[in-house]
Image (cartoon, rainbow, N blue to C red):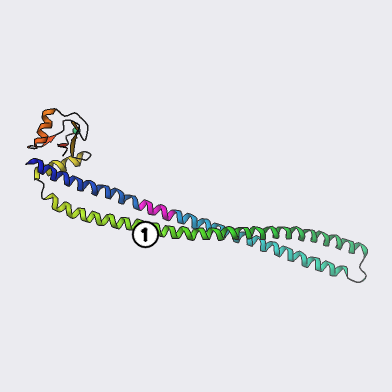
Amino acid sequence: MIKEDLEKLFMLQEIDHEMAQIHKQLNLHPPMLKRLENNLERKRKELEQTRNEQKELLKERRLMEKEILFRQEEVQKKQNQQMAPKIKQDAYNALKREIDKLKEEISRLEDKVLQYILKDEEMEAVFAEGERNFKHEEEDAQMERQRIQEQIDSKNRRLAELEKEREKHILLVPGDLLTYYNRYIKTHVPPVLVRVEQDSCGGCHMRILPQIIVEIHRGEKMVTCEGCRRILISKD
Ligand SMILES: [Zn+2]
């Protein structure tokens, strides 16, 4: 009876459908993993950038501290010159003006260094927090990777099962039905076999004549839909 053969082909279609779904899902995993890695890489770079900015600021601060030191030595020199015996009042006053100017500059530079120190502390806190967050993100990513890998493994296991099932099942389907099935999926969108639903084709929803429905129910020959050429099978 062709009805039973069609049900066997229908089973094959179910297997193929599940396999296609699994392949589709498996294709989603590489981009998911890629996104995960890209996200981590971006965060790693952000952290690195904070560190580099901090290093740059420290370099600038060291330069300023050198400038201060240099001026302090200048002040010392000039103060020594002021102590020279028999120094003229004019010369003494000129030195004093120079010393005052240097001290002003030192004070200005010291203010700046203080700003740098505060900024450095601020950045250190930002970095420490960033590092903590990054560690959590890495742990989360590791779990996510594992989760995805488990899914991949389980899907591949299911695929292997289905592959075996398919090999066995395909032997039960008569050759001419199989040929029709294979030819159809090469050129059309599956499914190839559809059930009749409310007197219409379950694929393209075209109405089916009552006598055709009777033929389908009898299941003595293969009936295809006039609209989409799909094989029609009865609802139960
Ligand atoms: Zn149809």
**124 sits left or right of 151 in the view:** right
Going by the picture, which residue comes out furthest to the front?
236
Look at the image and give the residue range highlighted in magenta. Answer: 30-38
Query: Could you tell me residue 121's position as x and y percent?
Result: 63, 60
Q: Residue at x 20, y 53 (%)?
A: 162
Going by the picture, which residue comes out furthest to the bottom?
85
Q: Residue at x 74, y 66 (%)?
A: 69
Position of the N terminus, as image quadrant, is top left
**194 sits left or right of 94 in the view:** left
Query: Could you tell me residue 52's position as x and y percent?
Result: 57, 59
Residue 75 versus residue 29 in the image, above or below: below
At label 1, the amino acid type is Gln
Q: Residue at x 72, y 63 (%)?
A: 67
Please, what is the dominant secondary structure of the magenta stretch? helix
Secondary structure beneath dot 1 equals helix
Q: Which residue is mark 1?
A: 146
Residue 146 falls within the magenta-colored stretch:
no
Residue count near mark 1 (Cα–Cα under 10 Å), binned few <14, some 14–19, many ≥20: few
Q: Nearer the viewer, residue 22 or 1?
A: 1
